Amino acid sequence: MTAKRLARLHTWNGWNLLFLLITGVILYMPALRSWTTSLRTPLKYLHIGSGLLSLGLLATYLPLAGDHFDRLRQRAGQKANVWLLAGLLLGWGLSGVMLILNRYLPEGVAESALVWHDRLTWFAVPWALAHAVTRYFKLRLFAVGEPVLEDRRVLLAGAGTVVGAWLWGRLGATLGVPGMEAAKPKYSSHQPIEPGAAFVPPPIVEPAVKSKGRFRVYTVVEPIPTFDARTWQFTVKGLVEKELTFDWEAFRQLPKVTQVSDFHCITGWSVYSVTWEGVRLSDLLDLAGVKPGAAYVKFISGDGVYTDSVALSTARLGDVLLPWAMDGSPLPTALGGPVRLVVPQMYGYKSVKWVQAIELIDREHIGFWEVLGYPADAWLRKEGAADV
Ligand SMILES: Nc1nc2c(c(=O)[nH]1)N[C@H]1C(S)=C(S)[C@@H](COP(=O)(O)O)O[C@H]1N2
Ligand SMILES: [Mo]
């Protein structure tokens, strides 16, 4: 009876885990982001649902665990496998729940949850493959028929999971495997990449602090759009007293401000103490003159696809910038150069990259990711809204 239930649990768990691994990798891999955009939100919920199912299966297993371990008395390898799997499921479950609650947890917590969620995954992929293959071919990598396994060795297997996951993450980072780069590499990893060079920004200040963390390069179009300083234009239009159009030469003459702020993506990563230099949006709005009917500011990316909007009151916040420099260098093309938007008090999806036009409008415009299921309320914390 127990044997049958165990076998059924094993099958369910195997398929569910495979589904979790596949959806997880699709959700995570930067290279897959741009061609899975419209699927991301449903995929995320399927992944979460499947993750919860997996914890449910673990709970169903617990009452059978005693029997199971009796059966495995002589099977050190299988016993270690069970522990390893339990460790993985718990680790994923815990970090996964932390990622879901991201917004309500202290700063930095989501980041470590993300790092651990990924590490466990990268560790689990080869293990799951090896496990599937050895099961399929009925290979036994571990000696069978040993005397009763000591508890100490079982514990070691659990500890091995954690250490293994950590080492695996380090290895991926060292080898620079895509998506496994170090969570907090040296700052030099995002110096300007190619084109941007043609855009000569005004003199840039030496940053007083060093930023901490790494931007994950997001784009919904492939390849990353590039621009030419000779033809690039920036427009302020809509409900304004006078429409403005700048070429690069004129744009770089605009009054500039420098600010240090944090940047948070809703998926869990953050970059702290980024030094931005550029134009304050509010100053630009004053230059154009906002008409009374305007209530929202819409941002249009030069990638031809991405847009978003914020309320006029948000756009007026002093820390909302259109930077052309970051951490003492021209803004890298990959990070939105020559000019992007930063709205530090909101999740990163509001910070449109490669901004080329802003339009004053009388009603809200639903942005690219909001259409696809991201929350309309992008404030980092609920209290943030009260500050406005
Ligand atoms: N044009 C454009 N802007 C964008 C995005 C994008 O895909 N395209 N991604 C958004 C999201 S979800 C985040 S978190 C930040 C990421 O900025 P980064 O790519 O510089 O790390 O950019 C935002 N602005
Ligand atoms: Mo994001």
Image: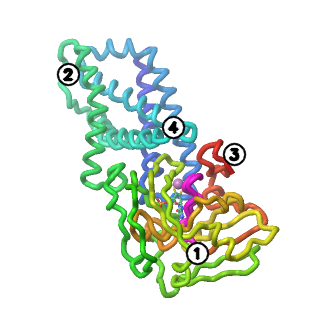
Q: CA distance from mark 3 to mark 4?
A: 19 Å
The span shown in magenta is: 341-355
Q: Residue 106 shows which numbered tag?
A: 4
Tell whether position 189 is magenta: no
Is the N terminus in the top left, top right, bottom left or bottom right quadrant? top left
Q: Earlier in the sequence, mark 2 or mark 1?
A: 2
Looking at mark 4, is its residue's CB closer than 8 Å to ligand 2? no
> In this rendering, which labeled residue sits more in front, label 3 or label 4?
3
> In this rendering, which labeled residue sits more in front, label 3 or label 1?
3
Q: Which residue is mark 2?
A: 144
Residue at 48% in and 63% down: 276
Q: Which residue is mark 3?
A: 386
| Residue 19 visible (yes or no) | no
Q: Earlier in the sequence, mark 2 or mark 3?
A: 2
Q: Which residue is mark 1?
A: 356
Amino acid under label 1? Gln
Give yes or no for contact between labels 2 and 1 (Cβ–Cβ under 8 Å).
no
Q: Residue furthest right?
A: 293
